[in-house]
Image: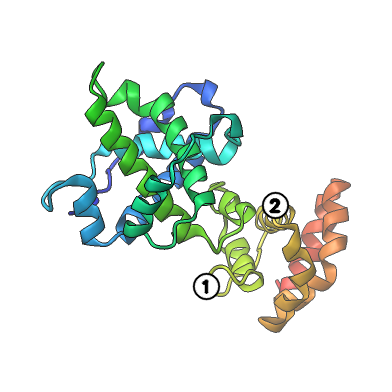
Amino acid sequence: MSVKKRESLDVYKNIDSSIGIPSQQLRETEALVYSTFESMGDELLHSLFGTDDVHVPTDYIIALSIALGVHQNKNISVALALTIPQSLIDEYNQALPSVTATEMKQASLFTEAFINKVVASKFVEDGDKDELSRLKHVSTVFYFQFQNSEKNKSLSLTQWLSSGDIGQSSHFMVSVLSPEISIIELAVPYDKSDFMRCEKALKMMPSLRKELPKMKLFHPAWEKLVDNWDELKKLNAAKKYGEFNSLLKNSIGK
């Protein structure tokens, strides 16, 4: 079993704008879909798709990416929750021992939206209940696996990672301040855009702001940046870009 990535990601430009999700975010979400499938063992993939020598269908990857994007951006109503019999929970517990009844409900919400919004119209002929059932099973297991791979990431971190507005300096900053991702190569914000991407990350993940002083330990430039952070924010808000640029350059030693 293999997961073959598409060469072109332009397909999302044609998605109906009524979905309300930027195409760049859908491309980022697709990357999470790929990584989730790639994290599954061969045995689990074989049980889902039935053979070792087929690719996960490209259209299926796209459909999952759209459905997951919708799910992440719009809380699916609890009114959509299915009544889950204990026997079904037991069945999935055998395949994925970490699954709980709560996760089962969450996966069912996702699956319900997935089937209704995407799969039924794209993959299933009218009356093909067996195929509908199979795809529902695949999407539910996929979501369990996705939850497991993302379980240590807060919703805000997941949303930030999926935003598409991530620079090297903001990525480095978050990797230092958050215990949920590994530290990457050192980088500092060199201009207003870099700085504002860092500030955006702190706004999306407010709990990290109090950790900002930790950045002082990594580089003299970050030490001065942290000391001048609030002033840089004020200068930017006041549109005093000349003073902002001077202070930023002074902070990073340029």
In the figure, 15 relative to 220: above or below?
A: above
Q: Looking at the image, can residue 55 be seen?
A: no
Name which quarter of the figure residue 247 lies in.
bottom right
The spot of residue 184 in percent (x, y) is: 52, 72
Q: What kind of residue is marked 2?
A: Met
Q: Quadrant of the N terminus?
A: bottom left
Q: What kind of residue is marked 1?
A: Ser
Identify which residue, 187 or 93, lies in the foreground: 93
- Answer left or right for 217 relative to 179: right
Q: What secondary structure is marked by label 2?
A: helix
User: Which residue carries the number 1 mark?
Assistant: 182
Identify which residue, 23 or 152, lies in the foreground: 152
For the point 70% across and 52% down, the residue is 204
Q: Quadrant of the C terminus?
A: bottom right
Q: What secondary structure is marked by label 1?
A: loop
- N-term mark: 2 or 1: 1
In the figure, 97 relative to 83: above or below?
A: below
In the rendering, which numbered label is found on residue 204?
2
